[in-house]
Image: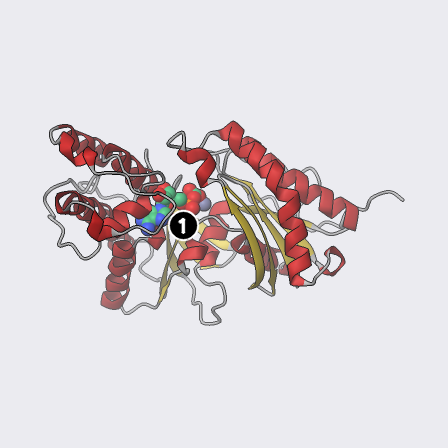
Amino acid sequence: MLCLGIETSCDETAVALCRDGRPVLEKLASQVDVHALFGGVVPELASREHLRRMGPLLGALFAESGLGLAEVDAIAVARGPGLLGSLLIGLAAAKGLALAAGKPLVGVDHLHAHLLAATIGRDDAAYPALGLLVSGGHTQLTLLRSPLSLTTLGRTLDDAAGEAFDKAAKSLNLPYPGGVYLDVLGRGIEADRRLFPRPYLDNRNLDFSFSGLKTAVAAFVAGRPHLRQAVMPDATGPIEAEAWPLELRRVCAAVNFAIADTLRVKVERALAGPASGAVSLLAAGGVAANSRIRDMLAGVARRHGLPLFLPPPALCADNATMIAAAGCRLAAAGLFHDLGLDAVPRGRKVPWDYRPVAPARCAG
Ligand code: KG4
Ligand code: ZN
């Protein structure tokens, strides 16, 4: 099963091929440089960049892989949740290819694909699994009874973990996107565990709320304006942690701790509750690249005697390999969409509306 995956839900334009769930090749164009000027993703610009980059990326994917559209068995596309205008570019590309080549179309839930990315290339995945999804737009705990049977156990009520990182970074005047700066600057520094609150733990549920942490960091920095005055280095080069003031790095370490430990408490609560039957732990999404969170998860897995599945950093962030890999699974199970497939905007749940359909063909 050779599957083409297309990802355009936010600010990465990506296309990839997977064979039987294993990566063949990916071509990805990040738009970070476009949006960095504005300190966040500008939806209109994102759509236009996807449109500009999609054709050349597809051309390069087929040229470099030596494979052709005729050899593809299914075309998978991220249908949401995401920026509506951006998703429509990916859907239009996928539908055009499906129609022209007479290939079946598979709409993929971006969040489902993130979670399955944890087990790409692994033959030892075990279910039921507890999945932690931590990205720029979502923070969720999910019980996976199998790769295709998911139940959400808890979700964020306001900011996602990635937003908490990015907003804390903005308060500290760190370059956009700030999550990776907080991670790298805080590495190897003993965190002051009392500096910031671990938000929304004083309850019995599995939901998250990170907006209070954002406010706490902003208030802390407001009283120490010099923290915002570290000279901004070349944001395109590697992050040299030693070049930054130690006081700022201590703040970064404390933010990392507050987010990682909040996630830890809810993961352990899930393992003691509705996910007590889980035989493995997996985590995914851009924030799963965070070193303190990866260490935290390794500790939880060890204490509970569970195998831990974490994607390599490149498969944590948005990518098309995860869409193609999820597409392989769905297509192999006979789950497809017709050309009426619609996009699902941010904040809405992606319906499980797959059905077996014959590929559409271009007349003549
Ligand atoms: O999954 P993703 O690439 O896009 C969404 O679907 O949202 O996640 C992007 C988020 C951003 O908030 C970014 O700052 C954060 O992941 N992120 C990190 C790290 N790398 C990316 N946050 C903390 N530590 C990192 N190393
Ligand atoms: Zn994502």
Q: Nearer the viewer, residue 301 or 94?
A: 94
Q: Position of residue 17 (x, y in %)?
A: 61, 58
- Toward which corner of the image does residue 162 lie, by quadrant? top left
Helix, strand or loop under label 1:
loop
Residue type highlighted by circle 1:
Gly
Give the residue at mark 1.
285
Q: Nearer the viewer, residue 14 or 294?
A: 14
Q: Position of residue 153 (x, y in %)?
A: 36, 47
Q: Position of residue 182 (x, y in %)?
A: 26, 46
Visible residue check, residue 34: yes
Q: Is mark 1 within 8 Å of ligand 1?
A: yes
Q: Position of residue 212 (x, y in %)?
A: 22, 33
21 displayed left or right of 184? right
Where 282 falls versus 363 (above or below)? below
So how many labels did they put on this image? 1
- Toward which corner of the image does residue 93 lie, by quadrant? top right
165 displayed left or right of 152? left
- Toward which corner of the image does residue 118 lie, by quadrant? bottom left
Residue drawn at x 41%, y 31% as measured from the top left: 37
Where 141 falls versus 218 (above or below)? below
Visible residue check, residue 186: no
For the C terminus, the quadrant is top right
Question: Badge 1: how crowded within 10 Å, few (<14), some, or many (20+)?
Answer: many
Q: Nearer the viewer, residue 131 or 196?
A: 196
